[in-house]
Amino acid sequence: LKDIQFIDSYYYNKLETNRFDSNLGKFVGYTAAGVRQAEIWNKDTSIIAVLNAQREAYCLNNVGID
């Protein structure tokens, strides 16, 4: 179950600006604005905790479905 990955991506004009990767445990920015936003979000530990909880609530509960 450790290899399950939760990804939450954000797009603007069909371009991925940033994403949360549960394997990294932080946001990664792909554009200049995305990098700035990722730095802001990574400083807020409550956002990181919520997204890690989403991995447990959504991904791990649905492992056996397929």
Image: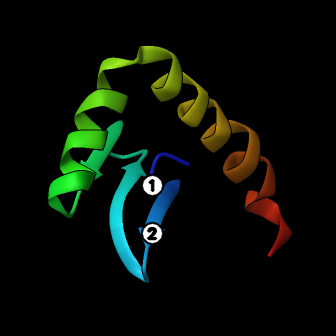
Q: Residue 42 appears in which quarter of the rendering?
A: top left
Separation (CA) of disc 2 from disc 1 = 25 Å
View extreme (bottom): residue? 14
Q: What element carries label 2?
A: strand
Identify the residue at horizontal 74%, vertical 48% (top origin).
58
Q: Do the residues labelled 2 and 1 touch (CB within 8 Å)?
A: no
The residue to which callout 2 is attached is 11
Q: Can residue 27 be seen in this view?
A: yes
**Three-letter code, disc 2:** Tyr
Q: Is residue 7 left or right of residue 44?
A: right
Residue 64 locus on image (x, y percent): 80, 62
Residue 62 locus on image (x, y percent): 79, 57
Identify the residue at horizontal 37%, vertical 31% (top origin).
41
Identify the residue at horizontal 29%, vertical 41% (top origin).
38
Quarter of the rendering occupied by the C terminus: bottom right
Q: Can residue 24 be seen in this view?
A: no
The residue to which callout 1 is attached is 3
**Three-letter code, disc 1:** Asp
Q: Is mark 1 on a helix, strand or loop?
A: loop
Viewer-closest of 32 and 55:
32
Q: Is residue 50 left or right of residue 33?
A: right
In the rendered image of this protein, does residue 20 appear above or below residue 15? above
Q: In this view, does 13 lie to the left or right of 33?
A: right
The answer to which of marks 2 and 1 sits earlier in the sequence is 1
Viewer-closest of 20 and 35:
35
View extreme (left): residue? 32
